[in-house]
Image: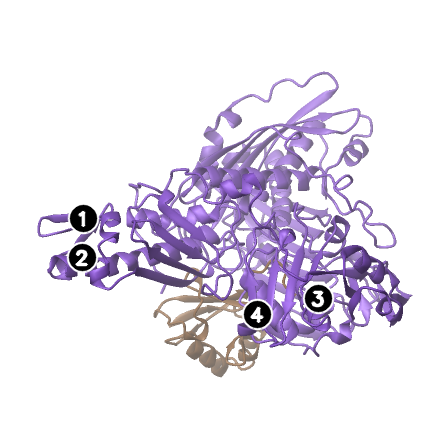
Chain colours: A brown, B purple
């Protein structure tokens, strides 16, 4: 079971919860299961079958570069934050 | 999952400071920069820039320019391919195609003074300049918006019409705030209500420029078969390729970007300005090579400064421990969305272990040049805000400023303000090193008559980058190594990358010849930026060297007619069954075993493992004039492992000086009309070597578990602490607090009011 730290803007879909537990083997499954449990979340996270531009997923302690393919350990935590950018358009 | 390493400690190459591979070319003037590019048939381009900060373009008449002798092409925005209002990932970050085109050349409005509205190509530079000035543009001048307060005011004129802002997940129209986001954990208001001491301040700072010496430039040839060749001063050739491909709707495989040396970038050369214009001018001019070089005024007025803005900061403390923190980060994006406020939000509370916090970020459009990255983008502003309040808390509590930071320091397991948990970090080690330093232990000393002295201290954080990099190794018959790597060389990265392969192979780094090829000749490699290069491209070099060793073990087994599993490799020597051969001797014996031995490695890494810096600044204030002189400065930094200590030290010193300039002198002085008044290096006051004392450095080495040698990024975090360290030193000297940067003589005199 992964622990998802919900971005502030998505907490309204989960009754204000800061974090929710979601069963998933990889990031794609996690987002699908998150959407099933908390409808409305997926469109904020995925676009054209990939993480939305400008969004980074932190799995465990570091940003993953594998996108939706990222495998998840059973007790890992997942964050969705703004991708680091110095100011692209 | 992420690979972690047990860090080595016994090195043959790492930790030495060999002479850089590009040193001779650079000191003798042989190195080729973008401005040096000459190709047969070269013609010159120039642009016409808006004299207004905010205006609607009513008409453009190019007929006079087109009729001039020697003019080959005139370009307006209609000549660009129709761009969708769509954001693409260039591999270097995201670019909204329509806004990207519009920043390169205005569509229907100009968003800042200096915004390009048209371009020409002509037989020589003078003709191009004259032709550009012959273009007639009719404007409807609009009121300029020059700060975040004006931009966020009710009924403020909208700069980017059609922008739909994302405000905490809600779509908002008719706004200059492109994005509002928040990180919040715990009941912040309740935590403040239960804190013994709460201090809240609002700080502000001006836009400032990276101030690289070499101006932007580009040369392009659009061939008849639609293959495009580009030379451009950039921190990443592949970034130029990606952006040009996106903005001009070209396949990336049609574009070759040649590497040229770079005369400074500091983040500002990650964005294209001239390359798409040079390319389209070349196409319109029948495939003639077209070159454009900016002047300094254009660099200041129209290329990405670091955002200015305003930050509200509130901190609560109980029994010497921070209990709550809340901040609003309002940063200027410039004329189009996309400031560094996201990164600022990651960094702002990262030096402290804070149980309850709220961070709200605002990306705010103003009629100033589109902001770009500048060395740890967003973190210096954030550091200034929180360290200003922390300093006041320490004063209020009467506690030692290092001890308070140690008592509240982020450490392994601490969560940043965005919720992400730290792996091993070295802030506490930096604070201890600062406390034990000669500088901190030494008395400040008495100031001469008419002057006052103060000491400031501040800490800061930068997360460091990872990303994509490629390195190729080719072992030569004589035992030397040809190395290709894709990172633009800034600060000696050719050498720091080669050293990591040399350490693996046991070959002296002096026996490496390092090249940075064009984009046709090396795998994708991201920008030299984000403090990523020595870490990421260095790890590609390390991996390539490891692969080469595996290849060579097979060759040795073949030569010695033994099993590969019996071949060992250590310290540059292969051994098996009592025989041994050095790698450089082996290189000359490879023909019968399959010929050349080569290897390549590409990586795509997560971030580089967090950097912390703690700086101490002593300065003197002339009480009659307000002039400040830094008299002693020490920068402490966790570098993970200094691959090339002299370069690492140079990065720290350079970053510190840039931060001191940000604190004390540098600013975009904007007139009521939205124009930058100080658009030359005479009036834009950057510190020089004559202004600065030696910047002492203390490099702390807490190995990064994500790298086999423990490397972390080095180049960015040192620009962050000086903003507050210098400001708090002025506070101690004058007895007055300062909340607006720069702390220039006029502000000091205003604050002291003749005290």
- Where is residue B481 drawn, in percent x and y? 35, 51
Q: CA distance from mark 4 to mark 1?
A: 45 Å
Q: CA distance from mark 3 to mark 1?
A: 56 Å
Q: Is residue B445 above or below residue A86?
A: above
Asked which quadrant contains residue B293, the reply is: bottom right
Name the chain under label 4: B
Using residue B322 as the reference point, say whether residue B705 is left or right of it.
left
Using residue B746 as the reference point, say whether residue B707 is left or right of it.
left
Task: Say what secondary structure mark 1 lies in.
Answer: strand
Q: Is residue B472 visible?
A: yes
Q: Dot 1 surroundings within 10 Å: few (below 14), some, or many (20 or more)?
A: some
**Viewer-nearest residue: B713 or B150:** B713
Residue where numbered disc 4 is placed: B255
Please tell me which of labels 4 and 3 falls first in the chain.
4
- The quadrant of the rendering that contains the C terminus of chain B is top right
Q: CA distance from mark 2 to mark 3?
A: 54 Å
Labels 2 & 3 near each other (Cβ < 8 A): no
Q: Dot 4 surroundings within 10 Å: few (below 14), some, or many (20 or more)?
A: many
Labels 2 & 1 near each other (Cβ < 8 A): yes
Residue where numbered disc 3 is placed: B277
Task: Say what secondary structure mark 2 lies in.
Answer: helix
Say which residue appears at 8% left-offset and 52% top-offset: B577
Task: Say what secondary structure mark 3 lies in.
Answer: helix
Name the chain under label 3: B
Q: CA distance from mark 2 to mark 1?
A: 9 Å
Residue where numbered disc 1 is placed: B581
Please tell me which of labels 2 and 3 falls first in the chain.
3
Q: CA distance from mark 2 to mark 4?
A: 41 Å
Name the chain under label 1: B
Q: Dot 3 surroundings within 10 Å: few (below 14), some, or many (20 or more)?
A: many
- Same subunit, tags 4 and 3: yes
Q: Is residue B53 above or below residue B163?
A: above
């Amino acid at each position: 079971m992964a622990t998802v730290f919900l971005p502030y803007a998505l907490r309204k879909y989960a009754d204000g919860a800061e974090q929710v537990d979601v069963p998933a083997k990889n990031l794609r499954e996690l987002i699908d299961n998150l959407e099933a449990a908390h409808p409305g979340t997926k469109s904020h996270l995925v676009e054209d079958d990939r993480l939305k531009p400008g969004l980074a997923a932190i799995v465990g302690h570091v940003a993953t570069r594998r996108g939706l393919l990222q495998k998840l350990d059973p007790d890992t935590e997942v964050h969705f934050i703004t991708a680091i950018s110095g100011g692209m358009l | 999952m992420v690979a972690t390493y047990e860090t080595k400690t016994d090195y043959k190459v790492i930790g030495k400071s060999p002479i850089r591979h590009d040193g001779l070319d650079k000191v003798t003037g042989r190195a080729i920069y973008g401005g040096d590019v000459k190709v047969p048939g070269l013609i010159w381009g120039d642009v016409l820039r808006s004299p207004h900060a905010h205006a609607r373009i009513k008409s453009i008449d190019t007929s006079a320019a087109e009729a001039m002798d020697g003019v080959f092409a005139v370009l307006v925005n209609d000549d660009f391919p129709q761009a969708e209002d769509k954001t693409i990932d260039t591999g270097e970050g995201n670019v909204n195609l329509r806004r990207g085109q519009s920043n390169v050349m205005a569509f229907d409005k100009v968003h800042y003074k200096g915004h390009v509205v048209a371009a020409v190509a002509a037989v020589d530079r003078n003709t191009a300049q004259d032709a550009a000035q012959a273009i007639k543009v009719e404007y409807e001048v609009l009121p300029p918006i020059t700060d975040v307060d004006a931009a966020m005011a009710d009924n403020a004129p909208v700069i980017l019409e059609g922008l739909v802002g994302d405000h905490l997940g809600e779509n908002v129209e008719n706004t200059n705030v492109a994005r509002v986001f928040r990180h919040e954990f715990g009941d912040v208001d309740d935590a403040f209500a239960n804190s013994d001491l709460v201090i809240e301040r609002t700080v502000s700072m001006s836009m400032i420029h990276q101030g690289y010496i070499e101006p932007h430039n580009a040369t392009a040839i659009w061939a008849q078969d639609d293959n495009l060749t580009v030379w451009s001063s950039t921190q990443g050739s592949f970034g130029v390729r990606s952006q040009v491909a996106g903005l001009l709707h070209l396949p990336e495989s049609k574009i070759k970007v040649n590497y040229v040396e770079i005369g400074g970038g500091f983040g500002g050369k990650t964005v294209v300005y001239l390359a798409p214009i040079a390319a389209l001018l070349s196409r319109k001019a029948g495939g003639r090579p077209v070159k454009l070089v900016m002047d300094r005024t254009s660099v200041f007025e129209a290329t990405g400064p670091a955002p200015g803005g305003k930050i509200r900061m509130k901190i609560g403390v109980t029994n010497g421990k921070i209990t709550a923190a809340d901040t609003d980060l309002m940063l200027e994006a410039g004329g189009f969305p996309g400031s560094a406020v996201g990164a600022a939000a990651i960094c702002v509370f990262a030096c402290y272990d804070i149980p309850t916090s709220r961070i709200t970020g605002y990306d705010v459009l103003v009629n100033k040049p589109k902001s770009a990255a500048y060395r740890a983008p967003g973190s210096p502003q954030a550091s200034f805000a929180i360290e200003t309040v922390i300093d006041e808390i320490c004063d209020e509590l009467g506690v030692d400023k290092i001890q308070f930071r140690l008592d509240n320091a982020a450490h392994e397991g601490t969560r940043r303000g965005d919720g992400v948990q730290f792996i091993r970090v070295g802030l506490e080690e930096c604070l201890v090193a600062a406390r034990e330093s000669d500088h901190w232990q030494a008395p400040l000393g008495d100031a001469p008559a008419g002057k006052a002295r103060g000491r400031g201290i501040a800490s800061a954080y930068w997360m460091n980058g990872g990303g994509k990099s490629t390195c190729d190794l080719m072992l030569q018959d004589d035992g030397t190594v040809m190395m290709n790597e894709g990172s633009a060389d800034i600060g000696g990265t050719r050498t720091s990358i080669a050293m990591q392969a040399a350490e693996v192979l046991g070959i002296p780094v002096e026996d490496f010849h390092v090249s940075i090829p064009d984009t046709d000749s090396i795998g994708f490699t991201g920008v030299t930026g984000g403090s990523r290069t020595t870490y990421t491209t260095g790890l590609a070099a390390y991996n390539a060297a490891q692969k080469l060793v595996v290849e060579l073990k097979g060759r040795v087994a073949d030569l010695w007619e033994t099993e590969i599993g019996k071949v060992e490799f250590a310290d540059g020597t292969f051994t098996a069954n009592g025989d041994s051969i050095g790698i450089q001797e082996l290189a000359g014996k490879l023909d019968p075993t399959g010929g050349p031995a080569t290897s390549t490695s590409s990586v795509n890494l997560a971030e580089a493992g967090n950097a912390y810096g703690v700086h101490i600044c002593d300065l003197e204030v002339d009480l009659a004039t307000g002039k400040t002189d830094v008299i002693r400065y020490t920068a402490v930094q966790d570098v993970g492992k200094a691959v090339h200590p002299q370069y690492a030290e140079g990065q720290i010193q350079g970053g510190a000086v840039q931060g001191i300039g940000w604190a004390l002198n540098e600013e975009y002085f904007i007139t009521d009309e939205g124009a930058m008044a100080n658009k030359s290096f005479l009036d834009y006051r950057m510190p020089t070597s004559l202004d600065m004392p030696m910047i002492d450095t203390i490099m702390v080495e807490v190995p990064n578990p994500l790298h086999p040698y423990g490397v972390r990024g080095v180049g960015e975090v040192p620009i962050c602490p000086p903003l507050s360290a210098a400001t708090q030193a002025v506070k101690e000297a004058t007895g007055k607090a300062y909340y607006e940067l720069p702390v220039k003589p006029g502000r000091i005199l205003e604050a002291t009011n003749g005290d």
